[in-house]
Image (cartoon, rainbow, N blue to C red):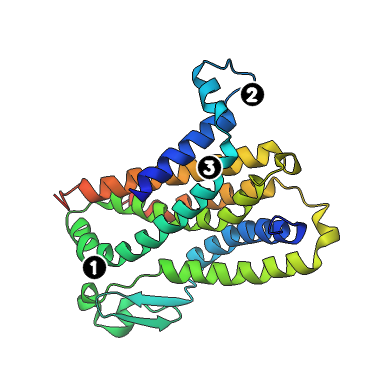
Amino acid sequence: MVAVALLGAITHQTLAAWGPADARPGSFFGRFRSIRPASFANAVVVLYAVSTLLGGIIYLTFRVDVRPELERASHWHVLGFFDLKEHFVAIGLALLPAYWVCWRPPLANEPPQTRTALTSILAFIIWWGFLCGHVANNIMGFGS
Amino acid sequence: MTSSAPFRRFAFAFGTTFAVLYVVALAKDLALFTVFPSLGIVLAGTHHSRDIADPAMGFLAPAMYWYGWAATAALGALIVALVAASFAERLARYVWPGWIWVIPVLSMIACVYLTLPWFRL
């Protein structure tokens, strides 16, 4: 639930940050723009931190019970993608303070490119983590 | 208050330094501590399963380094960020703010490079 809420918030914010500022009010991006992207920043920071904490706890079980099975089944690519998830998530966690600063009002204090880039990096990390986690979870039917 | 100039310097310095130090910790295997989840123990520093068990029995004591790598990078980044927040006011004017996203992207690419062995198996 936390991960899904995080996905929704960061995806909405990223599309709003990349979308054209002069979008028509009734258009797809216009509707995205009607909600201030900055209002997602606090939620993204909290949800990302909670997701990482929960993931860090579950990771212990993964290492003992799940990963050896993946190794025995020679799913090396999955393990590689999962390792990348670990690394990306750690780097993303450290970017949260800067991301939060960039979205604090007044937004004019920070370059919009920096804000958009940080948001996009976090969006990439969150989607990567979500997809890799699900592939690793489902590839051998774990949890079914 | 928290979005003041010192906190901004702290946040930007922490994010960039962590990204660099994490790659260094990963490449050099510098974990502040090692977790052995099946044994329920945490040892300071980097320890491999073969250090505490026969190599053939290593699967019984899988080691986890991710927490330790992150802790190593966080500790180093915290020190640098505190220095940046306290003293680097003048220097901050000359630092391009884009480094806060360029350096993490480069670090992520470095992580991909360091993870490539998994994809050659």
Q: Chain of mark 3?
A: A
Which of marks 1 and 3 precedes in the sequence? 3
Q: Which residue is mark 3?
A: A40
Answer yes or no: do the residues labelled 1 and 2 have beta carbons within 8 Å? no
Q: Nearer the viewer, residue A56 or B80?
A: A56
Measured in 3D between alpha carbons, the distance from the residue under mark 3 to the one under mark 2, in whole angstroms, is: 18 Å
Tell me where residue B11 appears, x and y as whole percent.
Answer: 65, 58
Measured in 3D between alpha carbons, the distance from the residue under mark 1 to the one under mark 2, in whole angstroms, is: 49 Å
**Residue B42 horizontal side relative to residue B78, left or right:** left
Q: Chain of mark 2?
A: A
Residues indicated by labels 1 and 2 sit on the same polypeptide chain: yes
Tell me where residue B56 appears, x and y as whole percent.
Answer: 20, 76
Q: Chain of mark 1?
A: A
Q: Which residue is mark 1?
A: A64
Q: Amino acid at mark 1?
A: Val
Dot 1: element: helix
Q: Residue at x 50, y 64 (%)?
A: B27
Q: Which residue is mark 2?
A: A21
Dot 2: element: loop
Front: mark 3 or 1:
3
Q: Nearer the viewer, residue B4 or A123?
A: B4
**Residue A63 horizontal side relative to residue B34, left or right:** left
Which of marks 2 and 1 precedes in the sequence? 2
For the N terminus of chain B, the image quarter is bottom right
